[in-house]
Image (spheres, rainbow, N blue to C red):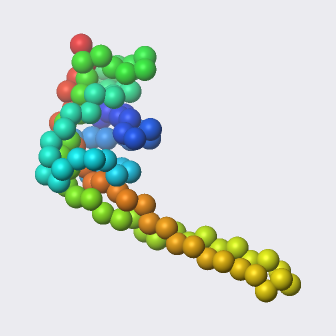
């Protein structure tokens, strides 16, 4: 059984006991929430597709931790001008563990 969920305007394909990293959410560490923005639920040959969301379906998740992603660097160099700059950025992430997937009506 798997589901496609929407968290923070991005979509993730998840199964039970999966761990995913999403953009930072305002949730307490160790907290348990239900995500009801389920776009698709598949259980063997039975597939439910939402318009836009599957009614009654939800995914129960636990917040494991908040962390920073890998550093990405931006660099710009202007030839023959003796001009350049470099900037670094790290995204703030929330790690979620999928506890269960509940089918829709």
The reply, left or right, for residue 37 in relation to residue 77 is left
The reply, left or right, for residue 61 in relation to residue 94 is left
Q: How many labels were placed on the picture?
A: 0
Tell me the residue at 31%/47% (across/down): 25
**Frontmost residue, 78 versus 95:** 78
Q: Position of residue 41 (x, y in %)?
A: 32, 26
**Frontmost residue, 24 versus 99:** 24
- What is the quadrant of the N terminus in the image? top left
Tell me the residue at 37%/26% (across/down): 40
Residue furthest top as drawn: 105
- What is the quadrant of the C terminus in the image? top left
Tell me the residue at 38%/51% (across/down): 23
Q: Position of residue 6 (x, y in %)?
A: 38, 35
Question: Can you say whether 79 is above or below 47 in the image?
Answer: below
**Frontmost residue, 65 versus 84:** 84
Tell me the residue at 79%/86% (across/down): 82
Q: Where is residue 67 in the image (x, y as percent from the top left)?
A: 30, 63
When asked about the image quadrant of residue 46, the answer is top left
The reply, left or right, for residue 90 in relation to residue 79 is left
Question: Can you say whether 15 is above or below 87 in the image?
Answer: above
Q: Where is residue 32 in the image (x, y as percent from the top left)?
A: 15, 42
Q: Is residue 57 visible?
A: yes
Q: Can residue 18 be seen in this view?
A: no
**Frontmost residue, 101 versus 65:** 65
When asked about the image quadrant of residue 13, the answer is top left
């Amino acid at each position: 059984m798997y589901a496609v969920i929407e968290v923070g305007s991005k979509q993730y394909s998840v199964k039970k006991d999966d761990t995913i990293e999403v953009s930072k959410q305002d949730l307490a560490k160790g907290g348990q929430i239900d995500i009801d923005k389920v776009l698709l639920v598949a259980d063997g040959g039975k597939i439910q597709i939402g318009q836009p969301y599957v009614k009654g379906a939800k995914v129960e998740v636990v917040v494991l931790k908040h962390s920073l992603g890998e550093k990405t660097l931006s660099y710009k160099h202007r030839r023959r001008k003796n001009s350049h700059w470099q900037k670094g950025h790290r995204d703030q992430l929330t790690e979620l563990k999928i506890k269960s997937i509940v089918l829709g009506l």
